[in-house]
Image: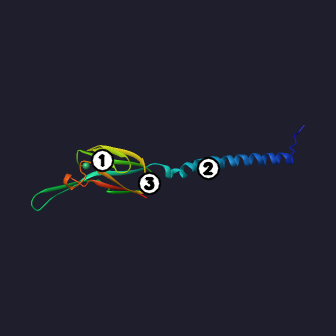
């Protein structure tokens, strides 16, 4: 006895339903893969700084120098997660604070200092080395974090 395939309307509906389910499943999964990249603006951004030194000799033979944060100004988006990495090249130690952000730390020669923060308020924040804060003390070692 040979079998005869009888395609009923009911079967077509069932096949269509299964196909729609499979397609929506594939779309849902691929959508899930795209979403994390859409969420990326909240990821932490790394900014690199170096401690350097300007040094010169005046006409009368006097050596003058100033330690510096380099770059001297960084621009941050309001609400952006920041990883600030500071590498100490010149000078043994630079204890610092960031005004208005309740952040402090120390940069040492040959070492990387890393700080994490999110600036939620617009403004210009100074990063100040407490040892070299002005000209009289081998500075001004002051940098500017512009949050905008
Ligand atoms: Cu310093």
Examine the rendered structure and indicate whether residue 103 appears above or below residue 125. above
Neighbourhood count class around disc 2 (C-alpha, 10 Å): few under 14, some 14–19, many 20 upward: few
- SS at mark 3? loop
Q: Which of marks 3 and 1 is nearer the N terminus?
A: 1
| Circle 1 residue | 96
> How many angstroms separate mark 3 from mark 1 (CA)?
21 Å
Examine the rendered structure and indicate whether residue 95 appears above or below residue 140. above
Front residue of 85/105: it is: 105
Residue 118 visible: yes
Q: Which of marks 1 and 2 is nearer the N terminus?
A: 2
Residue at image position (43%, 57%) is 122
**Dots 3, 1 in contact, CB < 8 A:** no
Residue 70 visible: no
Residue at image position (20%, 52%) is 137
Q: Which residue lies furthest to the top in this view?
A: 1
- SS at mark 1? strand
Q: Which residue lies furthest to the front in this view?
A: 100
Left or right for 25, reference 45 = right
Neighbourhood count class around disc 1 (C-alpha, 10 Å): few under 14, some 14–19, many 20 upward: many
x and y percent of residue 144 in the render? Answer: 34, 56
x and y percent of residue 40 in the render? Answer: 51, 51
């Amino acid at each position: 006895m040979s079998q005869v395939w009888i395609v009923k309307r009911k079967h077509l509906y069932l096949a269509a339903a299964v196909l729609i389910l499979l397609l929506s499943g594939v779309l849902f999964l691929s959508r899930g893969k795209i979403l994390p990249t859409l969420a990326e603006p909240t990821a932490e951004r790394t900014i690199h700084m170096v401690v350097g030194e300007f040094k010169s000799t005046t006409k009368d033979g006097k050596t003058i120098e100033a330690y510096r944060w380099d770059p001297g100004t960084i621009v941050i988006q309001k609400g952006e997660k920041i990883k600030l990495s500071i590498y100490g090249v010149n000078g043994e130690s630079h204890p610092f604070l960031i005004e208005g952000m309740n952040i402090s730390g120390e940069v040492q020669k040959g070492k990387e200092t890393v700080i994490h923060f999110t600036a939620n308020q617009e403004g210009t924040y100074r990063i100040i080395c407490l040892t070299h804060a002005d000209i009289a003390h081998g500075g001004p070692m002051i940098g500017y974090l512009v949050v905008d």
